[in-house]
Every structure is written in structure tokens, then in C-alpha cells.
Amino acid sequence: MKTILEIKNLHVHFPINIGTVRAVQGVDLELRQGEVMGLVGESGCGKSTLGFSILRLLRPPGEIVEGEILYHGRDLVRMEEKELLSLRGNNISMIFQDPLTSLNPLFRIDEQFIETIKTHDPQISKQEAFKKAAQVLESLGISPERLLEYPHQMSGGMRQRIMIGMALVLDPDLLIADEPTTSLDVIVEAQFLDLLNELRRQYDLTILLITHNLGIVAQLADRVTVMYGGTIAETGKAESIFGNPLHPYTQGLLASIPNIKLDQPELHTMEGSPPDLVAPPPGCVFHPRCPRAMDICKKERPKAFGKDDRIVRCWLYG
Amino acid sequence: MRFSPAAGLGKLLQRFMGQGKKYGMEWWVMIIGATIVLAIVIMAFCAPYIAPFSPYDQNTGPQLSPPNNIHIMGTDNLQRDVWSRVVFGSQTILRVAVLAAVLSSVVGITFGLISGFAGGNLDRIFSLIMDSVYSFPGLILAIAFAAMLGPGVVNITLAVAVIYIPTYFRLVRGQTLAIKEELYVEAAKAIGATNRVILWKYIFPNVIATTVVVFSMNVADAIMIEAALTYLGLGLPPSVVDWGMDLAMGKKYLPSGQWWLITFPGAMISLLALGFTMLGEGLSEILNPRLLER
Amino acid sequence: MRNLLKYIIARTLMTIPMVFILLTIVFVVVRIMPGDPVSTMLGGHAPESVIEKKKHELGLDRPLAVQYVNYLWQICRLDLGDSMVFKQRVIKAVEDKLPATLELTVAGMLIALLIGVFTGAYAADKRRSAQDYLLRFYGIVIYCIPVYWLGLMLQLIFGVWLHVLPIAGRTGPRVFASIFEKTGFYILDTIWIRDWAALGDVLLHLFLPSLTLGLVISGIFLRLTRANMLDVLRSDYVLAAEARGIRHRIVVYKHALKNAFIPILTMMGLQFAQLICNALLTETTFSWPGMGRLLMERIYLRDYPTIQGTIVIYALLVATISLIVDIIYAMVDPRIRY
């Protein structure tokens, strides 16, 4: 399968008044055509920051200080703003957590669609753009009359679909979804996942699914990448990660999920707390909490070990 | 161990300056504002020692002469030294503005506390009245008061004070309402604290911090209103030295280009108002810091 | 549309109690003076009988409660009484001057908005840059500058030293007063007659006073817009719009600003009271024949009915504008109506 996006050694920093937060520290990631990559980790591990960095949507004071993001070979980090703008929404789209606040409350839905379409194709007429929007909505199961409404007149699930619609109206090949189901209830979430599956087949879409919800990742993702403290812990096929977690963090994570079928007298927890990203621990970011930490873990950052699709950043496998 | 006063002072200053790094821009805004205010207050207190002439002296030099070595701000049509009038004018404006602010705050805070604490119909009536006065254009109300009461320092102080009572009222009432619901007040009541004690020990101290900020801004506003009233010819007899009045008088000589009569008094009004405003703004930022900004 | 109508009616009804209180305040304030208006007017040396007769004429010998009810009743009929000094109905005197004040005030507000809102948005966009700090400083300083002093300084620079702009009145000597019969709004009148030369003259005279007025108020709009914009620029829909490739300038000045503008509308209503106060000062400084100058004139002449009437109109004006602003708010923000 072709690689459409390659992230190489990405470092993202947030200089704030108490110091510099190293949100992403030397991350490598590959996205292949047509796959769903689940990017998981706890809050603050840097996964959302990573997602935002791709389209250079980092809120100030965040900045990419090192690394490359290659989209079909072109480096997005150093690209001219004009070119990047033409990619956004057009070739690479992003959807966010809360569909209500992601839509401008003062503009009608059709106006927002038409603006997007016309931005990337100034020649197109309003009517044609409207038709395109209507088409996309229909494929999402929404009747085109809804286009004339305002965001606050719709339900949460519908707004989520509108958001996806706007993201896909121009037929991008990569969709970045940042915590897309976090604000949805379980039933709507299930519908959403079905929808994503359907769309991904229909549009031959590559999806980067960023979430802390292991459940939806298990359902939808082909490959999974686990992040911790701004670094990648391990990456591989979904079955492999869930069935045979190699990194102690992933093992701890999966063991922490309460299983209703088991008779557990005590819930498994991981010692310690997430690292301080202003002054991260030397060596492996996880070593203070790792039950199997060795001397070398405290001194040097683990290299990537493994082959083909299975990679672990842990000295245990070195 | 020797303790020299100089070292102690130096350390104090160091800690003082160090605060700037902690708070950033807002600290400096406050300091600059405070400096301006202090400078003008000192000028007011030391007026007789700073001014080269008496502000009433109608024989200080040639009539309407532009700024020069003897008269650094020139002279007016009655041959008075403008700089001396500026120096003494500071007394009047500070006196009226600060007094008016103190009056407003005392009345406004008192009523705010009572109204917020008592609640019910009393609160509703007071609030309605205060809201109406608040929405009334301030200067117009002050003009009406000043016009009806007649000229005089006391009258003008009253006129200015009335406008700001609602500001304090609303602020304090709002806070009182909020604090009233707090758990620690309930706890105090449970152990038998009387209403007066609750008001004085619990609610009042919490309200003070924000009030100080409002007070500073209030003085700035009061300065503007006082100057406006005297500029319009209301409020003070010509025997008092006042920046606004000097502006009104100097206005007549504008077409003939005698700029120093209006430039300096007006600049002083702006400067003094600015000083109090910066003081208030800086203080407000420091007391309610915005998080995570560099 | 129907929702909007319902809202308008409800909001209008809510204004009535506030107007009632405002009118009461005016009534009370005008009567707090020590002594009585008649003796003051007649100079204090007039014989008792003359004073009593005059008092009876003006209805000042009746009990206060009766005077109060009379006063309210008259206002409902738009009758503000007669001037004590001139043979003139107060309402007529005010009517003559109202358009001048309104023209100045509206022009001032427009300038304040234009300057304030766009510089505020710019400052928010260029946050923490030199331009931002400079603009914020301007915002604080300009409010501390007395409007009349600014007016005088501008008159000095542009009128006296550079000689390019007029410093007094609404029109120059070469324009005929008869042109302005129709509405009293000079801009509208001259356009109506298509007298472009007169229009130019009117605009020239309007420029400096409205600029003075606008500048002083612009500071508040700048700071408010900037604060709102900072919030709005952090919001998700701005992020989502950027994610769709929409150009930054459009995102800031179309998407963000429209949202940030709504609270500014409310602020406009609140600022209106401040605006007419500053307009009064501007009028006296620029010899602008409006209500402010009328008020000051009559205060000097101790014409109490006119003083009262003018202040009443001021109060009603503020209440009306506040109502209009709330209605416009409902029109702009669809969330209010649906």
C-alpha cells in the first residue's frame, strides 16, 4: 500500500510562562492509503497536538521546531502558506470534537458549505456549489432542506454528520479526526462509526483517528499507534497491538480496562502520573512508572525496534 | 550580623522590581499610573513651594505671552502665570474628585451590602432605582445637579458623587448576593453569627478588593466630570483655580492662536485621568491574572 | 419573522417601567434647588405678589404630587410646557435642535465604530506584537482625553494653524438656511435637493466635531472588540474554518468579527449615554446648534421648563436607542429569535 503521509522526527513545543512544554518529542509516523490509523493515548500525551501539526493548525504559542511531514513527498512544515491553504479541506481535511462549536453559529449551513467549495474553486457558481453540498448531505442521510438551517437548530448527531460532510465535500484523500466521538452519546457514537466505515470505503479515504477511546479504535482501526508523554510507544496492526502488546505502557493500559466478564477483586492501575512535559524525565519518558525499567532506560531514549509493521520503542526489545 | 538600612531598602526595592517579572506588563502599567498620580499629588501638596507665582497674581508679566524662560507655560489674558495656575489647579481637581469618589463608594457600598444581603422587595426597589440612575447619561445628570444646586466646591462634589453611587451599588450587591450563598456563610449562621457580624466579617472583606480597582477608575472618571462641569461654566466660582475653567477661559483666545492657554491645562487633565486609569487597570489585571500568558 | 415581532413587542413593553423611573428622576432633580425658580428668575427683588402670581401661572403653587402627575400626563402628550424666558413651546425649541444633535451623534458613533472595531480586530489578530501594545495604549489614553480638549486641539491644528477645516457651526456663510427646512438633518436635506456644494459644506463642518467625538469613544470599542476577538479566535469554528483552507484574513474579518461584533452591539447601546454626554461637550466647543448647547444656554438663562424638557428628551433618547439596539441584536443573532 502506498504511503501518503510520512511524519519524520517531529518536535512540537509550546513556550509558556512556566517554561517550554515539549508536547511532541521526535515522533515518526506513516499513514498508508485507505487505512484507518488509530492514534491513542491518554490526555496530554500529544496525540491531538500531532494531529493539529499536520495541517499546521497549532494554536499559538505552539510551534513545530523540528522534523518533516511529507504528504505525497511534499514537506508540509516548510510549505508556502498559499499551497498549504489549498491543501486544507481539499486534499487533507480535519474534523473536531464538538460539532456544535465547530460550526459558525451565525451562518447558515449552505453558506458555510458554499464558502468552502468556492474557496478552492472560485470559478464554480453558487448553484453548483449548493448542489454539491446537497449531494454530500444526501449520501450522509440528511435531506438537503437542512442546508437552509442554522447549526443550533440541529441535533448533535446531525451536526457531526454536517461536519463530516464539509470535510469530505471536496473529496480529500486524508481525514484527520480529532476525538470525534467524545462529545457523542453511545448510540450516536455507534452510528458515527458505521458511517465512517461506510465513507472510508466509498471515498477510499485514509483516516487518522485520534482518540483516547480504545473501544472505537478496536472497532475501526487497521493499524494502531500508542503515544505516551509526547513520544510513540509502539505501533502495529490493531490485532497485534491489542492481542500482543509489547510496550509496558500499552500492557498497563490494556490491563487497566475493567472487564465485566472477569471476576476482578482489584482494578489494575499504573503507578505514578503522566510526565511533566516542561522537564521530561531523561531517557525513556515512561521509565519512572515502568515496572520493568532497566538502567539504560533512565539514560537513553529507546530507539525503534522491530520490523515491517510492528515497531516498539522500548529497550526491552533492543 | 549587621543590618544596614541601605541594604534593607535595596532588598525591598529588588523584591518590588522582581514582581515585574512575575506579573509582566500589568505591573508596569500600574507602577507608571501610580507614579503619575503620586507626582501630581505631591505637586498639589507642595503647590506653594513649586509655583513661582500666586495663581491669583494679575501682575506676573506681559499679557498673553507664549511660553518662555520666566513663564514656562506662558501667561494668560489677566497676566497670570499659567504654570502657577496649573500647579494650584491640581489641588481643586484632586480634592473634588477624590472626595466625590469616597462619598460615592461609602454610599454605594453601604446600600449595595444592605440591598444584596436583605434581598426581597427592598432589593428589588433599590436595584430598579440604581439601574435607572446608572443608565441615565452621567454628565447630563451631573449638569442638572450642578445647575440646580449652584456653584461651590461642595455642590460640585455632590453632583459628581451622585453619578457613581450605582456603580458601587451594583458591584457590591452582585458580590454580596454571591457570597451570601456560600457555604461558609451558612456555617457562620449555624453557629449563631448575627447579620451584622456576617456582613462585616465575611462579606465586606471579600468585596473590598474589587472595590479598590473600581475606586481608582472612579476617581479618573470623576476628574473628567469635574473638569467638564467647570469647563461648561457650572460648579465653581471664578475665585477658585481650576483646570477646566482655565480651559473655558482660554478657549476664547484659540482663534488668535494663543495655544498655551488651552494646551497645558487640558494636558494635565488627561495626564491625571490617565494616571488613575492606568493604576486601576494594572491593579485589576494583577488581581485577576490571566493564566498561561507570556 | 414572527418570532422577531414577538420579541420586539416584549422588549418595548419592558422599556416602560424604566422610562417611568427616568422621568421621575428628572422631575426630582430639577426640583432640588434651594430656593424657588421664580424668585431666582425674577432676580429676588420682586414684590411678593408678583412672585405669587407668576408661580400660579406656572402651576408651581400646587402640591408636588399634582405637579408630578401633571408632568407625566403632559409628557405622554409630548407637551413639555412653555419656556419661562422666551415665548416658545419647549417641545418646539428642542425639536429644532434635535436633528443637529442626532446628526453629530450618529456620525460620531459611526466613526467610533469604524476606527474602534477594525483596529480592535487588527490588534487581536496581531496579538502581543508592537502594533497590539500600541493600539491598546491608544485605547486607554484616548478615553482619558477630555473630548472638548481634543476638539480644541484639533481646531487649533486644522482650523487655526493649517486653515483647512471650519471650527464652528454646521454650515458656512454661503449656504442658505432655507435649504434645511425638510428634515433638519443637513446631510439628508442637501441630498434631497441635490445641492452638492451645500452637501460638501455641511460635511466639511461635520467632519471635525464628529471626528473628535468618534475618536474619544473609539478607544472603548477597540478594547472591547479586541477582547471579544481574542475569545472568538480561540473558538472551534474559527479553527474549523482554517482547517478548510479559508484564507486567514477572511477568517478574521468575516467569521470571527461577525461573532465578536454581537456583544459590541450591546456595548453600543450602553455607550450611547456616554456618547450624548460627549456630544454635549462637543457642541459647546464647536458652537454646534444642538440640544447640548440649548441646555447650557437655558441653564444660564435659568429657563427651568426648557431645562427640564431638554433633559427629559435626553433620557427618552437613551431609552429609545437602548431598545433599538436590542432589536438589532435580535436581528443579527438568530439564536435569540428561534
Image (cartoon, coloured by chain):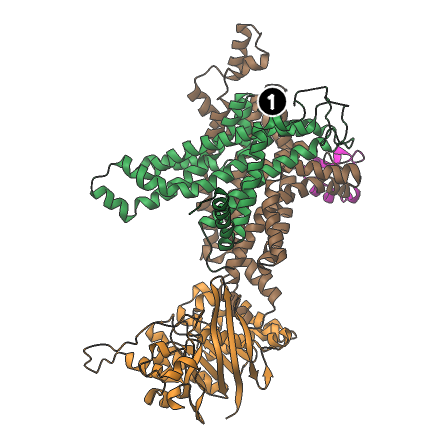
Chain colours: A orange, B green, C brown
- Looking at this view, is A210 or B144 the one in front? A210
Q: Is residue A8 left or right of residue A247?
A: right
Give the residue type that dot 1 points to: Val
- Asked if residue C76 can be seen in this view, the reply is no
- Residues in magenta, as a range: C170-197
**On screen, residue C245 above or below C252:** below
Residue C274: image quadrant is top right
Find residue A178 and report its horizontal and vertical position in percent: 45, 74
- Looking at this view, is B276 or A279 the one in front? A279
Find residue B245 and report its horizontal and vertical position in percent: 64, 27
**On screen, residue C39 above or below A232:** above
Find residue B20 and report its horizontal and vertical position in percent: 52, 52
Q: Secondary structure at mark 1?
A: loop
- Looking at this view, is C45 or B268 the one in front? B268
Q: Is residue C191 left or right of residue B144?
A: right
| Residue farthest along the front direction in this orientation | B1
In the picture of the structure, the residue carrying the numbered disc 1 is B240
